Amino acid sequence: MSALISSSIARKVVMALSGLFLVLFLAQHFTINLTSVIAPDTFNEWSHFMGYNPLVQYILQPILVAGIIIHFVMGIALEIQNNRSRKIGYVRYNGSANAPWTSRNMIVTGLVVLAFLGLHMYDFWVHEMAYKYLESNPEDPTRYYAETVEKFEPIWRTVIYVIAFVLLAMHLWHGFSSSFQSMGWNNKYSAGLQTFTKIYAIAIPAGFIFIALYHHFNPITH
Amino acid sequence: MNLNLKVWRQNDAHAKGKMVDYSISGIDGDMSFLEMLDILNENLINEGKEPVEFDHDCREGICGSCSLQINGEPHGPDKFITTCQLHMRKFKDGDTIVIEPFRATAFPVIKDLVVDRSSFDRIQQAGGYISVNTSGNTVDANAIPVQKEAADTAMDAATCIGCGACVAACKNASAMLFTSAKVSQFALLPQGQVEATERVKNMVRQMDLEGFGNCTNTGACEVECPKGISLENIARMNREYLKANLKG
Ligand code: HEM
Ligand code: SF4
Ligand code: FES
């Protein structure tokens, strides 16, 4: 078992499974966020459900947090291991001659996403935890929409969100289809998967960017 | 043509190496890259200097020993060739060519451009074989029917010449393409089934022990491989590895 955990392929599969799980989560997150643009009441309803349903709070949320931690800790561990594999570097290394930028810079795009997650957790999650558990405020199923839109009032936060999602798009551009290769899945459907990866990697982050910009330019007038 | 060369010079495994500049003239486009280096060495010998040490043997793309990093790419700018098959017509008069050894912790430099690739041998020895009785009662290989497609794919994998370009190209110095080619050539054939489980486990363990990096699926190896070994082999090895470990 310990041999398996230290094996390069097993680590890669952990990376792939956690990454794919995050890809699924991202789609779900996007679906809920989209309602904040098209149906604020539905957004409030769903947000309230996510915030107070015990299954979501005590089972899904810890799994998500664990998934994120496993993914970035393993990503950083692999990066360190990979750097050790070439202790003396090339004087001239023409990386772009044989591999795309996105595939060679997963750690860069990943770390930017991690930094963004710090801000994102502070913005929404820390606030939620304080509201619910520290301040013990009463349930208010109608507060989410206004709270969310308010967050996008300052231009600096909107800009940070936009940049983070551009880098997430780059991360997914390579990562989504790569995770299937890691799990040993390379066959006649792989070309189709490549196409789907490119569509997903652009469409979902672009959607998040649209939502952030939409709220920034359509503030709630008091 | 006249060329400027920047060549890695290193006295021995423990010495600190450095890039040294050389000018060379009278190079013909029809010469191979190694012939150009031969001329450089003749010049150096005539000047009473030590020639540049580099690996070569067959000079026809089958032995895999002529491994050089040329202008940041293994085997130079051309695709599906080894350094000995690279023609000087790929360069222009006045070009500067940077020539370095393949870099990987598992490929330590022995001298100048020569690296020790015995880590590949040890991966191969860990499982890259099948058990066949060769002492008198050898079985005809053709006695076991093999599906055409499997035979072709196994043959494609078996064309790996162990040059190490995959490792040299990879940003992680990963040996996954080499190891997966060696695993695949047996995994696809009935003769390889007996040792299949232990083979993939042992070869991957040896690969990790040698200090090669992890695979990020950048695909650089496949692009630089002189034999066009496909990434499908890495996926196959990952499958074989997972299957072997689930079996216990
Ligand atoms: C939290 C910060 C993150 C960091 C530090 C990070 C880091 C990395 C790194 C370094 C890799 C490449 C590993 C390798 O193959 O060598 C990777 C792969 C991947 N990441 Fe992330 N990542 C992060 C967030 C995310 C998020 C939010 C998603 C999805 C929404 C994601 C999805 C993926 C996928 C699908 C892969 C491909 C796995 C594979 O090739 O097998 N990552 N990540
Ligand atoms: S897989 Fe290709 S690049 Fe790697 S050692 Fe074999 S022939 Fe050379
Ligand atoms: S010298 Fe044998 S492959 Fe180049």
Image: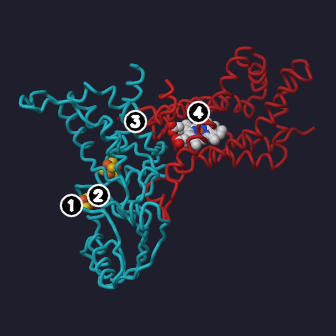
Question: Dot 3 falls on which chain?
Answer: B
Instruction: Check mark 4 vs ligand 1: CB closer than 8 Å? yes or no.
Output: yes
**Classed neighbour count for the residue bearing mark 2: other residues with Cα under 10 Å, few (<14), some (14–19), many (≥20):** many
Which residue occupies 84% across, 41% down? A219
Which residue occupies 63% across, 33% down? A26
From the image, tell me which residue sits under label 3: B204
Image quadrant in which the C terminus of chain B is located: top left
Instruction: Check mark 1 vs ligand 3: CB closer than 8 Å? yes or no.
Output: yes
Same chain for mark 3 and mark 2? The answer is: yes
Residue B88: quarter of image = bottom left
**Classed neighbour count for the residue bearing mark 1: other residues with Cα under 10 Å, few (<14), some (14–19), many (≥20):** few
From the image, tell me which residue sits under label 4: A23
For the residues labelled 4 and 1, the Cα–Cα distance comes to: 49 Å
Same chain for mark 3 and mark 4? The answer is: no
User: Is B182 placed above or below B106 here?
Assistant: above
Which residue occupies 28% across, 74% down? B38
| C-beta proximity under 8 Å, tags 1 and 3 | no
Which label belongs to residue A114?
A: none
The residue type indicated by label 1 comes to Cys
In the figure, the shade used to draw chain B is cyan
